[in-house]
Image (tube, grey):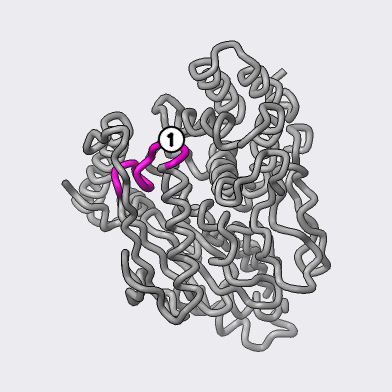
Amino acid sequence: MRCHIVPPHMLERIARDAGDPALRARARRSLVLSSAQRTERRLFPASPTSPTEDFVPNRTINDAEHGESLPGKTVRKEGDAATGDKVVNQAYDWLGVTFDFYEAAYRRNSIDGAGLKMVSTVHYGEEYDNAFWNGEQMVYGDGDGRLFTDFTGPLDVTGHELTHGVTQYTANLEYYGQSGALNESVSDVFGSLIKQWHLKQTADAADWLIGQGLLAKGVHGVALRSMKEPGTAYDDPQLGKDPQPAHMDHYVKTHSDNGGVHINSGIPNHAFYLAAKAIGGNAWEKAGRVWYETLTKGDLESDADFAGFAAATVAAAKRLYGEGSETTAVQEAWTGVGVSQ
Amino acid sequence: MKVKVIRSGGFAGLEKHAESDSARDPMLARLVDRVDLGSVPPPGRIPDQFLYEIDIDGDRTTVGEAQLNGPLRELVHHVLGRAR
């Protein structure tokens, strides 16, 4: 089996722009191959697992030592004792919780469903206010300390980034426009569910915030996004105001941020919240199951728009719960945010 | 000569705007001279990476943080740094 040493975005670039036609052709072949492998993986898991098999994580934490080369120096591997660096240990622990969540809630074995090694790099860059998934691993900055604290702090940030990996291996939602906003939203949904599962909170008790604890002291805000009330997470002289809409009437058309993927994700985020709230109980059990099925079933188009995703969640709810109250809750959630009539 | 930079994207999805004018920024022209916007690769679709939109007197391009290197990186950080 081939390993994806070259990330897909780089292959895309080579396939399009390389001067050498042979190189372009080779990159195109690799791209087709890796997308075929992804499809294969999601339809036929690499090794059939028994319903009781205990999945075990395989974590590696690297330290970029404030540089920007990846993956950096390995500082803790699976089973190693805690180091003296609390950022390293936090990243390790939150990867473990995220892995356990996917196993316990959906019987998923890691990011790809087949035990993929989980790799994180911490202390990336200088005063770096971000965390991202680069197609192969998670990367975390320490924050600048004035606006943002360390990005390994909140559990939902790790859940969000790792879920970008799950999406890549399943529905592979294109990171642009509405499919990109759905990609973002799916990461927020499962990021929040991981936190709720960890804290044993029902839909009623949860805060439905993304990045709570990430804003530095003195910043006017509670988090970066609110799934319960999109647009209300912060309002600060330096950061501006949370721009997220909660309804299609306020959908933001922009070319920045890949077509506003971090802005318009507020709409599907709120739809999930409405569905989970209406169903009640632990949100990861039913609403989360519907979203997980939608993402991983294999019939969602990678360029799905909000309406297409909504229809897929309703179809998934019907498969799981028939015409029961759960399905009604999902239908009404999408009506509530103006995606469907 | 005017250079505008908008940083968008990132986990937080916050936009940061900055602008510099060579009339008040003696270093700007020298930094711009070394930059060739035509040779910038298109941004990869990397979840939560920063995107930089760069406008040099109306010539525009968008670059992802993974491709922001060399003279263009110097220019972008110079302009964003002046916004603080």
Instruction: Say if A286 sits above or below A70 in the image.
Output: above
Is B62 included in the stretch rendered in magenta? no
Write the residue at 71% across / 21% down: A332
Is A105 included in the stretch rendered in magenta? yes
| Residue B66 in sight in this render | no
Amino acid on which disc 1 is placed:
Ala
Position of residue A125 in the picture relative to residue B26 (left or right) = left
Write the residue at 41% across / 64% down: A120
The majority secondary structure of the magenta stretch comes to loop
Write the residue at 47% across / 79% down: A85
Instruction: Say if B75 sits above or below A221 in the image.
Output: below
Residue of label 1: A171
Stretch in magenta: A104-115
Whole-percent x and y of residue A31? Answer: 29, 44
Position of residue A160 in the picture relative to residue B58 (left or right) = left
Question: A180 and A195: which one is in front?
Answer: A195
Position of residue A137 in the picture relative to residue A144 (left or right) = left
Write the residue at 70% across / 67% down: A215
Find residue B56 and report its image quarter: bottom right
Whole-percent x and y of residue A37? Answer: 26, 38
From this viewpoint, which residue is outermost toward the top? A323
Whole-percent x and y of residue B16? Answer: 69, 65
From this viewpoint, which residue is outermost toward the bottom? B26
| Residue A324 in sight in this render | yes
> In the rendered view of the protein, which quadrant contains the C terminus of chain A?
top right
Position of residue A302 in the picture relative to residue A23 (left or right) = right
Specify the subunit that label 1 lies on: A
Question: A338 and A106: which one is in front?
Answer: A106
How packed mark 1 is, by other alpha carbons closer than 10 Å (few <14, some 14-19, many 20 or more), is: many
Whole-percent x and y of residue A210? Answer: 65, 53
Q: Secondary structure at mark 1?
A: loop
